[in-house]
Image (cartoon, rainbow, N blue to C red):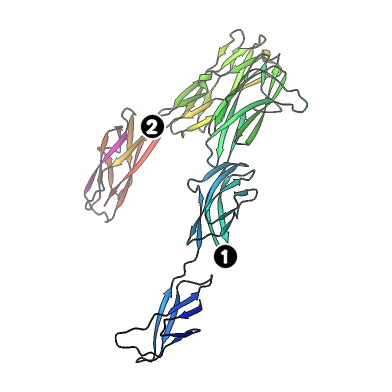
Amino acid sequence: MTLVSMTGGSAWSCASNICATANILQPGASYPTITVTASVASYALSPEINQVSVAGGGSPSNSGSDPTTIVAPDFTITLTPTSPPATVMVGGSTTFTVAVSPINAFNGAVTLSAPGLPTGAAAFFSPATITGSGTSTLTITAPASGTGNFTVTANGLSGSLTHNAAGVLAVQDYTLTLSPYSSASPPTIPSGGTQTFTIGAAGLNGFTGNIALGLSPYNLNGNPTCNFSNLSLPSSVAAGSAVTVTLEPNSTYCFFQINGAVNGDIHILNGAVYVSSAFNFNFALPASQGTLTATPTTQASTVVFDPILTSVNNFCGTIDFQVSGLPTGVTATAPPVSLCANSPLTVPITITVPPGTPPGTSQLTINASGAENNAGQASNQYIYPYLQVGSGGSTFSLSVSPPQTTAPGGTAQYTVTVNGSSGLGNVILTATGGAPGSTVLFNGSASYSVLVGGSATLIVATPANEGLGTYSIPITGMMGTVPKYNSAALT
């Protein structure tokens, strides 16, 4: 702070930073006001203190001060959206709104920038400078590959003033799979036959939207492209699900592409199918059996797939089956069959799901293999159904009455209840542990059978010389091969 001038009334004589008067101040009177003018530097800190000293009169030295609060022009900056994070597909673009608001009559030019973007990302502001107040559209272009969340920072600079605001951008993507697919050994179908493929889709970094689908023939290694007499292709597939496409090609080798697109994010799958006039049999699954559900309880649960075998060109021979992709512990029963004049033939393939199998969905591969008159090169056909394992069928739990206290040589009694839906079956209760030398019995027996929804009395008898302390009594309930556990506490 720098003094500019000091001015007073007619009683004062002011020069530079001193004002003086020869007038004698009468009792109860006051001198005229002195006005002090000062300039404040742009870098001044608040508050600044004006110090005034007075000499003369009855008090040789007095002083006074006047704090001055420095109010400087400034601005704030905001970025929207901030929550939830903005989303964009890899290589795509999205926009944020940047707003500049003035403080204390600020009217400077604020230059905008977006520092710290990951490699491959780009930022564009429109406009790139805001004067005083206003908004700008920030367009962020995501990298062409790689998913994840990164911070978007909008920085505003005006002279020595700088402020920023931050948001989060989630870069998303997806994957597509096609089955069956093998460019070296594509599925083989008879002339005039059809082939069904499954297109699976999975979202990356939280993507759950729809993926537009398209199909086109293409030339691979000099092989001609093909046309389709009959084509069934859904317009889209949702991330986390699967759809099927059915083709009826009219050329020997048919190579095609499945195109997936989301806002310019394009993925391509290659597929192929071979048409043979000497094909021996066809193997197909009814549309209603694309997914079957098994829910094991205390007993195993079974489901039966019923694919249909059809003879082509008077095929006659034995067909063998192999099932893969089964969850751990799940088994398949698919004995060989003879296909001849009995065409078409429905083949039951039984899947057995044991108790305790974790819930979930698995895509199975069922291969049918056979040769004409059981000689020569075997033909192979595949279907790809889904097995869904349900949960909740064997749910039960054990509850125990509150902890008990007894003296050495005494007994404690608990009520053990088997909780669950009635009709599930019996649960065998057993208990071990407790204080050394204790006797632990259910209704007088070492084990006891209780219907779900029922209860049993657990009595613990302690020896007379038992030491003081708290003991745990583990309790086990078995429903078939499914165990549940709890414990009783005895002090």
Q: Is residue 174 magenta?
A: no
Residue drawn at (49%, 72%) of the image: 45
At x 40%, y 35%, the residue is 482
- Residue under label 2: 394
As drawn, the label of residue 387 is: none
Q: Residue furthest top?
A: 341
Q: Nearer the viewer, residue 317 or 364?
A: 364
Identity, as a three-letter code, of the amino acid under mark 2: Ser
Q: Could you classify mark 1 by the number of other residues whose Cα lies within 10 Å: few (under 14), some (14-19), or many (20 or more)?
A: few
- Between 308 and 323, the residue placed more toward the observer is 308
Q: Is residue 491 above or below residue 235?
A: below
Residue at image position (26%, 54%) is 466
* Stretch of the chain drawn in magenta: 408-424
Asked if the residue under mark 2 is in contact with the one under mark 1, i.e. CB atoms within 8 Å, the reply is: no
Left-right relation of 445 to 112: left
Q: Upstream in the sequence, badge 1 or badge 2?
A: 1
Give the vertical position of 13 relative to 324 (above or below). below
Circle 2: element type:
loop
**Extreme front residue here?**
10
- Horizontally, is 183 left or right of 41 in the view? right
Tally of numbered discs:
2
Residue 456, how many percent across, how many down? Answer: 26, 37
